Amino acid sequence: MIIDSTIESCGNWCGLVAAFIGCIGFGTFGAPLKAEAVDRVNADPFVLQTYKSTMCFLTSWLVLLLGVEFNFTPYGIISGLMWVTGGFCGIFGIRNAGLAISVGTWSSITVLISFAWGIFVFDEEVQSITGTLFGILMMCIGFIGMAYFTMSSSSSSLPSTCERECECAATNTESEQAIIPKGEEADSDGCGIIPTPLVLPETESEHSGSEASNDNDNDMTARLLDHDHGNGVDGHTGTRSTAGVDLEDPSSLETNTSSEYVSLDEAVNERRLWNQNQNQIQNNEHEHDHEHEHENDNEDESDNCENDLNANDNDKFNLFGLQCDRKVIGIIGAAIDGVLGGSNLIPMKLAPTIDRGLDYVISFGIGAAIATLAGWALRLSIASCRQKSLNAGYASLPSMHLSKIIIPGALSGTLWSIGNIGQIMSVTLLGETIGMSIVQSQMIISGILGILWFGEIKGIKMIMGWVLSAIVTFIGIICLSGEHKS
């Protein structure tokens, strides 16, 4: 084929160009996933992986336009299964350990795994083992440095607990804010609350009770005035003594015949104070239930905010009944992605020669589609067993949010597919050791986007530290680029 002869004639340079294309694709595919629409829906990790797999499958057929003949090898299914599993673990790592540390972890491990496969398994020839090791070491140091400065910058820019609480309070609906005691004020740091007497919004029944109490007060006052005036007692100077009067029964005031007198205003105020105390007691008794009702009514709107506020407390992950540190499990997930990522093109090395290179792209796409469908089938089976119903299990599966994230999801998958084609060609022309390692320099591309576009790395010191780490990585790339023996 013309395309094959052209690639073979340009040798290592084509491999380096392919590696650069791989870096661009892999380094930019995450940018669309930072869109506001994607953040808003908080899509399931496997949903995002599904978008990547779909576009990988659809775009893989475009190689036919380059004159590549259709050839399918079952090894593509193995590669697809490894990639889908690794991609899911990688997203899990990002969610639990953070983006920077996860990318740094899997990139370094991918380089080391690729080196081990190429040198110790496939006996790939290099100019110098020492030079190759030095280049890989420089790249790993650069990866760790870029991850460190990215993570440090992100940590320093995080809002304090007080600020996060205020932000969450600001996002609450009016009904949620009604739970906060009225009349409270912010303390000196602008976030804490100075407690004042509790006043909760009245429910319909409480409101009716309050009106009834006021009516009782007015009725009682009227009765006292009528009774006192009827007995020749001046309402502003005295009334019959309250001795022996049951304040829980206002009518008992009418029947009290004690000869002792107290102020009428004092008796009325005493009764009114008792009503207020009773209302306060009832409010306190219903406080828990009242708050619980508001939490249930606004559960969907407050989940994200509550998750943020409890992030520091929710640092454990239940793994088969064992309580494990969430960050540690996230790093393990990223490490699994690194191992599988450094190995997912090994099946191509085992496939017949005719199925390698661009011919392998379609097989990889088909394998990714099959692996993704198998993953959804597994999730449906597990959900159906738990729900004891196929329909209920299907309804419990996460939404694809097609109307909201199909555009950023499709764009992300397309960019990743471009990177995957570059990676396949780079490994074909430069070998597993060098080709796969150079492609992992995607961290430089994603870091540049993070600095210039998303502002993820802040502060001159952090940026300069990241730039120096990127330079170290680039030195490693230069060392590796000259180590391949044609």
Image: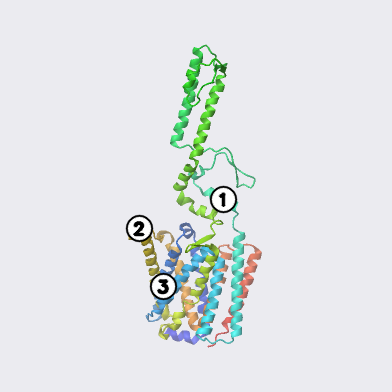
Instruction: Inspect this view and state whether residue 352 appears.
Output: yes
Within the image, what quadrant is residue 205 found in? top left
Instruction: Name the spot of residue 77 as percent of width and height, x first.
Output: 40, 76
Instruction: Name the spot of residue 140 as percent of width and height, x first.
Output: 59, 75
Q: Nearer the viewer, residue 3 or 243?
A: 243
Number of numbered callouts drawn: 3
Q: Distance from label 3 to label 1 (Cα)?
A: 42 Å
For the N terminus, the quadrant is bottom left
Badge 1 marks a residue whose secondary structure is helix
Circle 2 residue: 392
Within the image, what quadrant is residue 444 found in? bottom right
Q: Residue at x 59, y 53 (%)?
A: 161
The kind of residue tagged 2 is Ala
Compared across the picture, whether 147 is left or right of 209 comes to right
Instruction: Name the spot of residue 427 as percent of width and height, x first.
Output: 49, 81
Q: Residue at x 40, y 71 (%)?
A: 371
Mark 3 against mark 2, which lies toward the viewer? 2
Badge 3 marks a residue whose secondary structure is helix
Compared across the picture, whether 58 is left or right of 183 comes to left
Residue 165 is tagged as 1
| Sequence-wise first label, 1 or 2 | 1
Badge 2 marks a residue whose secondary structure is helix
| Sequence-wise first label, 3 or 1 | 1
Instruction: Name the spot of residue 162 as percent of width and height, x first.
Output: 60, 51
Residue 292 is tagged as none
Q: Nearer the viewer, residue 385 or 455?
A: 385
The kind of residue tagged 1 is Glu
Mark 1 against mark 2, which lies toward the viewer? 2
